[in-house]
Image (cartoon, rainbow, N blue to C red):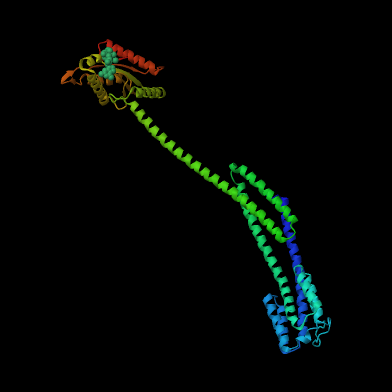
Amino acid sequence: MASAAQEQQWKDRYRELVRDFEEKEREWSALEKALRAAAGKLALAAMGQGKALDAAVDAVLATLRSDLTAPRLDASVSGLVRALQVEGVAGEIVPPVSAPGAAMALPPGAASPSLETLFRQLVAALGQATPLTHVAAALELRLDDGVSATGWEPFIRELADAVIQVVDSLQQQREELEKFLEQITHQLSEFERWTTWQEGAAQSRRDDSVGLERSVQAEMRSLHQEMNTSPDLVSLKTKVQARIDTVAQQLLTFRTVEERRHAENEKRTNELRREVAKLKSKTDELGQIVAAQESRLMIDSLTGAHSRYAYESRLEEEFQRWQRHAQPLTFSIWDIDSFKKINDEYGHDAGDRLLRGVADIFAHNKRAEDFFARIGGEEFVLLLPMTVLETARGVADKLRQAIETAAFRHHGAPVPVTISCGLTEFRPGDTAAAAYERADRALYQAKESGRNCCVAL
Ligand code: GH3
Ligand code: MG
Ligand code: MG
């Protein structure tokens, strides 16, 4: 960015240029006025020489009073010259070349300087306009050498052309200056837009931004220096344009890099998004697998009853609930009587089928709120929430009887199956392990007391 001081100097330089231009404009409009006045006098000098000539002079005067343009002045000067030839007085009104300063035939009452004096005044005025100095010098030389009768037409035309040239050049320079300033303003505002954008950009571009800023500053410094040393508007314009082009190029490069970086970021973000989506679906998949495994783990594959794993977490839940709400909870362990013998007698597969049969009887006869699981070979657990020991004993005995009376068969022959049960109700201060241990002891006692019975402790 240009510093405030540099910006001020830029503005000062601009004002200076405008001031110069205005001064030049004033000088030239004074010159233009002098030329108009002199040309007017010239026309008056020729007046009254003849009708056609008078009309032509009127036309020249009208042109001089109106906006001076090259074609108009050219047309009226042509008219004047033609009239002079028609009236045949050209030779008379034009001073003899060999007699400088000779008086012209002038109409009465008209201003009376000689035509040559007037021309000399005009040429001198013309000489003050820098670009026309050489034209003025050439015209002056021709006056000094003497102008022939037929030489006046081209002489007057050249003089008129020179006046028009001054006016046109002035207009052209004004337009050029305006166009140039407009262009600069546009480019600077573009530059400012980019600078603002750059200022608002993210941290990641900091390095590039600093580099850009440094080179822009260098360009601005050079620009500033050139503004102070440029001899004229044209060379200043060229140099300023070159600097601005360089800055614009740098901005373009910066923008290209920035866009590339943006595209790269976008690409990475998309890749990341895709990776996250993949990971998410993988996680979902894994979650489903885990859930499936979990639910598989909860079920005992042989009997379809709850597994030991399910029993452990359920026991913990029921124990916590019992502790919180002080509601009764009864624990019971079941073990098939003489199962080893059944296996031995009918085979292991028959044993398995028996296990499934026993589990089915539990499933169909237990209460909905009770929890049944196979915790070992032919051992089961039944948790009876919200149930006091006495009630549990009744439930357990019903289940025991259901198995006893189930009438299992092997190849049509009845297979007597009984089961023993140990029960206990959770007591204050109990842990789950303590209750288990007591129920196990009760089961042992049931076995000890002849099997096919329920013992409560
Ligand atoms: P008790 O009345 O004292 O309980 O005698 P029991 O024979 O039932 O007790 P024991 O613990 O001596 O024998 C249990 C047998 O159960 C031993 C084992 O072969 C059998 N068993 C354990 N798991 C399975 C199983 O999944 N399938 C089959 N078919 N048999 C099993
Ligand atoms: Mg056993
Ligand atoms: Mg057993």
Q: Residue at x 55, y 47 (%)?
A: 259
Q: State the residue in front, 274 or 259.
A: 259
Q: Is residue 349 rendered to the left or right of residue 259? A: left
Quarter of image, res 103: bottom right
In the current view of this chain or complex, which residue is farthest to the top?
448
Residue at 73% over, 86% down:
84
Is residue 434 positioned above or below 300 on the image? above
Residue 40: image location, x then y, percent: 76, 80
Question: Where in the figure is residue 193, as x and y percent of width and height?
Answer: 61, 52
* Quarter of the picture holding the C terminus: top left
Q: Is residue 228 left or right of residue 258?
A: right
Asked whether residue 337 is in view, the answer is no
In this picture, residue 307 sits left or right of residue 32: left
| Residue 313 rendering spot, x and y as whole percentages | 38, 24
Residue placed most toward the observer, 397 or 411: 411
Residue 447 versus residue 236 in the image, above or below: above
Residue 97 point in image, percent of width and height: 80, 82
Report if residue 79 is visible in the image: yes
Quarter-of-image position of residue 317? top left
